[in-house]
Amino acid sequence: MILYSVAEGIARITLNRPEKRNALNPELIAALKESLEASAKDEMVRAVLITGAGKDFCSGMDLASLDRTADAGVLDHLETARSLADLFLAMRHHPRPLVAAVKGRALAGGCGVATACDLILAAESAQFSYTEVNIGFVPAIVMAILRRSVSEKRAFELIATGEVITAAEACSMGMINRVYTDAEFEANVERYAAALAAKPASAVSLSKNLLYHTDAMTFEAAIEAGVHGNALARMTEEARRGIERFVKKN
């Protein structure tokens, strides 16, 4: 269900159900969480790249697995929903930057997985959509993340219409970071991930933690958190070496 490898500071996690367009089921979600845990514990990992095998990134929840829960009670539904929520929280709290490399379609829960990453790179032919509304469902768990990525009106339009948007449209509204031509997508993704992995790991990790930590803070509290983050960053070995190099050059 998941292909996992680490090389040159980059953990590569591939959703590997191409025959099902990498649709999410309980087993795939559990395997993805395990891979994230492994990459979080590996000191050699400095960035995580999440991709999909085959033509699509991820088509969303496996409707066959959802259909099996049609007669389940509310506690059963809460349990299955919690598994996806735990995945998104694990992604948010992961110490390294998570980069989604999207080609083909990222739909419904698959769009949610991409959105839950810290950065999204897309091929120009990629498509994004929260299609849940079309089957009477709601992209409820990812909504908190989407709301922080785009404007309120854009977020509502995406979830209320289920509109499929292009990579260029997603980039223009701030939903994703970069769009590359299909022909150069793989090469550009590798360069982007390598450049990210080459940054001082402690600085990137502290930056990610502080950025998300200030979400619900008042302005004053966020500034105070920044004071502590600044002081902590100065004490890291990487910062010490970086300052020494800068002083020597000047």
Image (spheres, grey):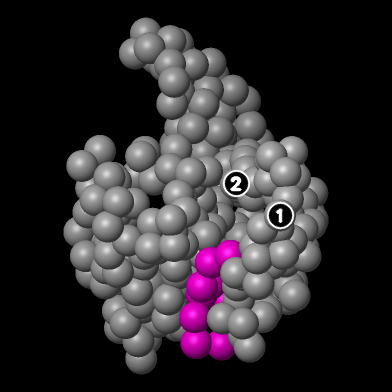
Image spot of residue 212 (x, y percent): 49, 32
Near-viewer residue (203 or 30):
30
The local crowd at label 1, few if under 14, some if 14 to 19, many if 20 or more residues have their Cα within 10 Å, is few
Image spot of residue 4 (x, y percent): 74, 72
Q: Spatial distance from mark 2 to mark 1, Cα to Cα?
A: 26 Å
**Residue drawn at (71%, 54%) of the image:** 71
Near-viewer residue (126 or 143):
143
The local crowd at label 2, few if under 14, some if 14 to 19, many if 20 or more residues have their Cα within 10 Å, is many
Q: Residue 133 carries which label?
A: none
Q: Give the magenta-colored segment's residue range.
A: 51-61
Labels 2 & 1 near each other (Cβ < 8 A): no
Question: In the shown orientation, is residue 84 left or right of residue 2?
Answer: left
Image spot of residue 142 (x, y percent): 48, 46
* Location of the C terminus (image quadrant): top left
In the rendered picture of this protein, how many numbered marks are placed on residues? Answer: 2
- Would you say the magenta stretch is mainly helix, strand or loop? loop
* Location of the N terminus (image quadrant): bottom right
Image spot of residue 155 (x, y percent): 29, 46
Tell me if residue 243 comes above or below residue 228 in the rendering. Answer: below
Label 1 sits on what residue type? Asp
Tell me if residue 110 comes above or below residue 15 in the rendering. Answer: above
Question: In the shown orientation, is residue 243 left or right of residue 79?
Answer: left
Quarter of image, res 69: bottom right
Q: Which mark is residue 88?
A: 2
Q: Which mark is residue 71?
A: 1
Residue occupying the far front of the picture = 71
**Residue drawn at (67%, 80%) of the image:** 17
Tell me if residue 85 comes above or below residue 6 in the rendering. Answer: above
Q: What element carries label 2?
A: helix
Residue 48 seen anywhere in this rendered image of the structure? yes
Near-viewer residue (81 or 64):
64
